[in-house]
Image: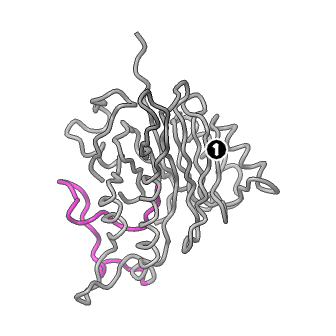
Amino acid sequence: MNRPRRITAASCNFELNDDGDYPTWLAMHERLARLDVTFLCRRETFGYTPSGPGVRLFAESKRILKRAGELSPGKHATALYYDPEVSEHIDVWDTDWPSWLLQPTAMPLRVRGTRDVDLVAGSGHLHYNSPTQRKAQAENPPRLADRVDTYADDDGPLQRKLPVLVLGLGANSYVDRGQLGLGEQPLPRLTKINDAQHRAHRNYESVTAEQVMDCQPDRILLMAALADAARHSALLPAGPRNSQPSHPPWRRATPTGRPTGWSASTPPTGCHRPSCAPRSSA
């Protein structure tokens, strides 16, 4: 009897792609390769291009990781890698969305060996310094969960919404205070942040003229049922490494619990590996 296949994912913000330091870049990619995940959501992939001078380094990253991959438009600052033995490429969506400095990467994929088991995966990076821009950008990822495709069925054409399996997102903000679990770190107090510029980047003024820590992306994504799979798994009573999928991997359909440099999904994915962020920007 074959064991059910498990889908794993990692989300990694490697700051500036190590900005030309090849030995460190190589060490990071060898480390990522050892994780052997099904999906790798990368951010700050500066220096990669789909053609021209950066194409060789991007190709080398795919060779080391033993994964296929796609880059975002614009600055090519995000990337999505996937295991071609598990899923096959269908398309890459146009994510050249207004107001995004670092556009996301998003694509539908088909589970290999199936006729119509399709899913959505992506990688994104919300605005670093503007809470206003972050809020506007956070309203875009739910579009990835709105995709409806038509499939052949015995009773005729059938329309079906595609599930978001994984979305690795650098949110540059905080978990909603009301969602914090027992033992989690509380939100920082604004007055305790010594870096004045960082204080400005991470808070906004409420309707009562109070400066509050920015949790707006978290609330928006939760409302859209885009749950933080890594955080949900970590907060399970038995812990992430002892948890087991309660349904076969391709039949899970119940949205889970919730984000901050996070891996989101609409159905829970059984992603039991911690997000990879050896060098992450705030």
Q: Is residue 51 above or below residue 127?
A: above
Q: Residue furthest top?
A: 1
Of the pair 206 and 252, the residue shown nearer to us? 252
Residue at 54%, 74% (x, y): give it. 99
Of the pair 71 and 187, the residue shown nearer to us? 71
* Percent of width and height locating residue 166: 45, 46
Of the pair 31 and 87, the residue shown nearer to us? 87
Residue at 69%, 56% (x, y): give it. 21
SS under mark 1? strand
Q: Is residue 99 above or below residue 22?
A: below
Q: Is 172 a magenta residue?
A: yes
Q: Is residue 198 left or right of residue 86?
A: left
Q: Is residue 63 above or below residue 24?
A: above
Q: Is residue 114 left or right of residue 155?
A: right
* Percent of width and height locating residue 209: 26, 90
Q: Is residue 143 left or right of residue 224?
A: right
What segment is highlighted magenta in the picture? 169-196
Q: Would you name the residue on which mark 1 appears?
A: 69
Q: Is residue 147 left or right of residue 21?
A: left
* Percent of width and height locating residue 145: 42, 52
Q: Residue furthest right?
A: 52
- Name the magenta segment's main secondary structure: loop
Residue at 47%, 54% (x, y): give it. 144
Residue at 32%, 49% (x, y): give it. 231
Q: Would residue 224 be seen by someone viewing this image from the given angle?
A: yes
Q: Would residue 18 be seen by someone viewing this image from the given angle?
A: no
Amino acid of disc 1? Gly
**Number of labelled discs?**
1
